[in-house]
Amino acid sequence: MKNYDGMADETLALLYVGGDNRAFDELLARNQQKLYNYILFVVRDPELANDVFQETFVKVITRLQEGKYTDSGKFAFWLSKIAHNVIMDTFRQQKSEHTVEVSKDNDLNKLRRQDLMETNRENEFVNTQIMADVRHLMDTLPAPQREVVYMRYYQDLSFKEIAEATGVSINTSLGRMRYALINMRRIAKEHDLQLNLEL
């Protein structure tokens, strides 16, 4: 009987690919609690975390069996990337399921008043201009700061997700955002730019 204690996760993954099912059992035992805690931290719902955890391991098994894993880095990071993708898919699916359909007897004509429409058009124009100014300000930032601003505000990623995607610590991501905002405010003030969005 093989002793898996001293083997790295990456070695176990390759053993499983080669047909050793007990190697996968060991991988699961080593990684399940840490992975589940990560998923639960993100989704904040134990039932949903269980579903995401199971879906993640289905994808892990499938990818391993299809030969889509190569020992090119830490297995735990590869695992967390798959979990991250499953979480994002789950959130997208939940979002689409919660789209509200307007009933036929709901009269929205009251919202079409001319003065309201003109105000909305004006606000829309102002907001478009502000977002264009923000884009120009972002272009002046150093690449790491620009990247974190884009991921946070245009991709709506958490700082944990940004840290994982960019391969830095959460503190580094937060620091880059802080410096980016300081720099953008300074440049906006120097050029007398108004950056408050109209609702």
Image (cartoon, grey):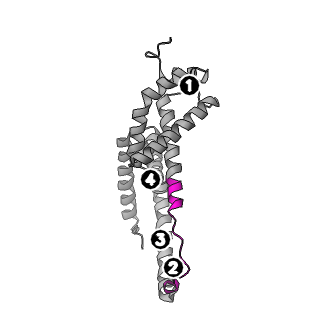
First-in-chain label (2 vs 4): 2
Magenta includes 92? yes
Residue nearest the viewer, comparing 180 with 75: 75
Q: Give the mark nearer the N terminus: 2 vs 1.
A: 1
Q: Count neighbours of disc 3 (C-alpha within 10 A) and say few if under 14, some if 14 to 19, many if 20 or more.
A: some
Q: Label 2: few (<14), some or many (≥20) within 10 Å?
A: few
Residue at image mark 4 = 152
Give, as a three-letter code, the residue at label 3: Asn
| Labels 2 & 4 near each other (Cβ < 8 A) | no
- Which percent across, then down, holds residue 16? 57, 23
The residue that mark 2 highlights is 121
Nearer the N terminus, badge 2 or badge 3? Answer: 2
Residue marked by disc 1: 71
Query: Vertical placement of 71 versus 36: above or below?
Result: above
Q: Is residue 196 above or below residue 152?
A: below
Task: Give, as a three-letter code, the residue at label 4.
Answer: Arg
